[in-house]
Amino acid sequence: MNKPNGSIWTLAVDIGGSGVKVMILDEQGNPGGKRERVKTPQPPKPEAIIEAIVNLAKTQPDYQRVAVGFPGVVQQGITKTAVNLDADWIDFNLESTLSQRLGKPVKVANDADIQGFGAIKGQGLELVITLGTGFGSALFINGKLVPNLEMGHHPFRKGETYEEQLGRAALDKEGKKKWNNRLEKAIANLEHLFNYDALYIGGGEAKNIEFKLPDNAKIIPNVAGLLGGIALWNQ
């Protein structure tokens, strides 16, 4: 792709429990190349995943900065939780480590937060949930992120959390019908809890939804988890 002189390009990275994805974005957050993906290394330790990112970055056109979505709580570039990866991620400085490996400035945020930035309209109260290996969430008020909303680990029903009831392991164990019934109940609960204006549902397992969503809810494409990365540099 021919890139105009003077443009700043961002390498967007999405780290997931099953896959690691990259794509470059222009200054408006539009794709500037093809999305590339590899399976998340097993065991999913920091060194292995960082190596995967470095190799994926080599498949992309030149870029000047990096935005990373990580499946856990992130504070000042340090990953504080990593339920669906490896315990070695706890208190790991992903921002500085990846910046050293790539030789570019890096910003890191929760992956659901970034997916939300790629989907929201910035009006009223907007909730984002992601259905993948785990259960991610992000809440926005007039486009402003409410930080560190780890709703997936809050109690949902029968003594289990949203993630335990609606994560990929639950889908595989219980089957689509029961999983859909649970998700429908979860959406009703969340609407009463937050009184949101809009709900956006993303993640790899959103494709398994088989019931009619409420009028104020919609499924968003997985690529939003990359497209929202530009918001880390535009805030």
Image (cartoon, helix red, strand yellow):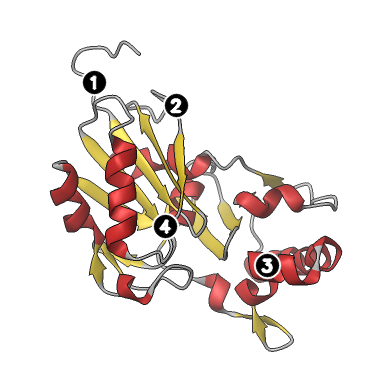
Mark 1 and mark 4: span between their CA atoms? 33 Å
Circle 3 packing at 10 Å, graded few (<14), some (14-19), many (20+), is: some
The secondary element bearing badge 4 is classed as loop
Look at the numbered discs 4 and 3 and tell me whether their residues touch, using CB distance below 8 Å. Answer: no
Q: Is residue 120 visible?
A: yes
Query: Label 2, label 1: how many angstroms apart (C-alpha)?
Result: 18 Å
Between the C-alphas of marks 1 and 3, the distance is 41 Å
What residue appears at the point 54 percent right and 44 percent down from the top-left corner? Answer: 123
How many marks can you see? 4
Of callouts 2 and 1, the N-terminal one: 1
Q: Is residue 102 above or below residue 73?
A: above
Q: Quadrant of residue 89?
A: bottom left
Label 2: how many Cα within 10 Å (few below 14, some 14–19, many 20+): few
Measured from the top left, where is residue 131 in percent x and y? Answer: 62, 58
124, 151: nearer the viewer: 151
Q: Nearer the viewer, residue 73 or 97?
A: 97
Question: Separation of disc 4 and disc 3 at Cα?
Answer: 33 Å
| Residue 197 place in picture, x, y as percent | 65, 52
- Residue 75 image position (x, y, % from top left): 29, 66
Which dot, 3 or 2, sits closer to the camera? 2
Residue receiving disc 1:
7
